[in-house]
Image: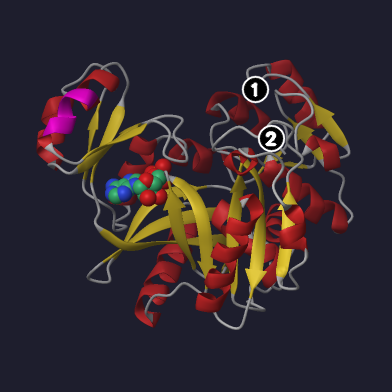
Amino acid sequence: MLGGGQLGRMLAHAATRLGYRVHVFEPQVNCPAGAVAHKEVNASYEDLEALAAFARECDVVTYEFENVPAAPLKHIESLTQLRPHWSVLETTQNRSREKRWLRDHKFPHARFAEVAAGGDLAGGIREVGVPCVVKTADFGYDGKGQLKVMTEDDVPAALARFATQPVVIEQFVHFACEVSAVVARSQSAAVRVFPISENIHTNHILDFSIVPARVSPEVLAKAEKLARLIAERIDLVGVMGVEMFVTRDGDVLVNELAPRTHNSGHYTIDACMTSQFEQQVRAICGLPLGAVTLLSPVVMVNILGDAWKNGEPKWDALLAQPNVRLHLYGKADPRPGRKMGHFTVTARDANMAFEFAEKYKGRLTS
Ligand code: AMP
């Protein structure tokens, strides 16, 4: 596993349950995944020798985030099996390449323009039109490296902030809601899509995932089909998160692809026959994919470092509930916006689970 954050940690849980040994490669010491893996290697992603030594010890290598530099990974692919393939990471780790790939493969997406570093940003904004969102082409996640341009008055700030970086300018989508799919594709090309999640973001960071998504059967079918086709066209072996906007007309637009497990898929650990992490293990290790059956309506709530603002969150309030499961990632420093853990709430239906989830979230800090 390249990357030692919470996604790697939950993958390690799933892999060890199936009897595998997990090695983690992560620049920072004492990482969340290293604490539950068999071996933790701390070195830079640019350290080709360390990467090669790591790869030689592994039968299969995967990654838990898309900001691993692509060039060293190409080297790993020549030494052992890398899943998903290097080409999938290369396409999805840069917003320009990702958007172009979606356009070239005729997947629905928001209108966009690309502007090179130092290029004609004002012209790009004019071309797409206001309102729009300016996003850096590289290293963006959780709304980092992006700025909404809602009126002409916001244009100067965007010009100042993005003058020297390559960017993608996207039409602002007045979405009815956001949904996502976690799709898995096996080495023998079988595809399974987990139940579609409805996602509520606060300050660009995922706050709640609600499953089943409260959208029409037609929207569900469109979202599932898009995820399946994307996995096939991009030749995925592994799992991928597909983030989508649902417009007020019921159209589904693809926002972003993540070639790994996804925050909005954490609900699968507690509410599906197979978790997204076990599915990742199965897909990359050449096993058959597991069933994606939903066992109960569920809501997942992220716990950010902000929950520590008045001291340690009140875990007892959560743990006392019969329909809650708590997951903490073992991170020491609860900085605002940092994902420290999550909890899931199951109930008879999605609305009820969401009501419980909001109430329980409030009690954590009250
Ligand atoms: P991203 O980093 O692209 O996933 O964006 C983070 C969040 O910003 C999304 O989940 C949306 O809530 C919002 N966002 C991003 N792009 C757009 C857009 N083109 N129109 C409206 N909202 C957007």
Look at the magenta stretch and give its main secondary structure: helix
Q: Dot 2: what SS?
A: loop
Q: Dot 2: few (<14), some (14–19), or many (≥20) neighbours within 10 Å?
A: many
Q: How is the image coloured?
A: secondary structure
As for residue 238 lying within the magenta part, the answer is no
Q: Nearer the viewer, residue 284 or 333?
A: 333
Q: Dot 1: what SS?
A: loop
Question: In the figure, residue 244 lies in which quadrant?
Answer: bottom left
As for residue 155 lying within the magenta part, the answer is yes
Q: Magenta segment, which residues?
A: 153-157
Distance (Cα) linking label 1 and label 2: 9 Å
> Which residue is disc 1 drawn over?
45
> Which of the image's four quarters has the N terminus?
top right
- Indicate which disc, 1 or 2, sits on the residue closer to the N terminus: 2
Q: Dot 1: few (<14), some (14–19), or many (≥20) neighbours within 10 Å?
A: many
Residue 207 appears at what percent x and percent y? 51, 53
Mark identifier at residue 353: none
The amino acid marked with disc number 2 is Leu
Q: Residue at x 59, y 77 (%)?
A: 297
The amino acid marked with disc number 1 is Tyr
Residue 42 appears at what percent x and percent y? 77, 23
Seen in the picture, residue 196 relative to 338 is either above or below; the reply is: below
> Which residue is disc 2 drawn over?
2
Confirm or deny contact between disc 1 and disc 2 (CB under 8 A): yes
Q: Is residue 250 left or right of residue 181?
A: left
Count of labels in the image: 2
Q: Residue at x 69, y 52 (%)?
A: 284
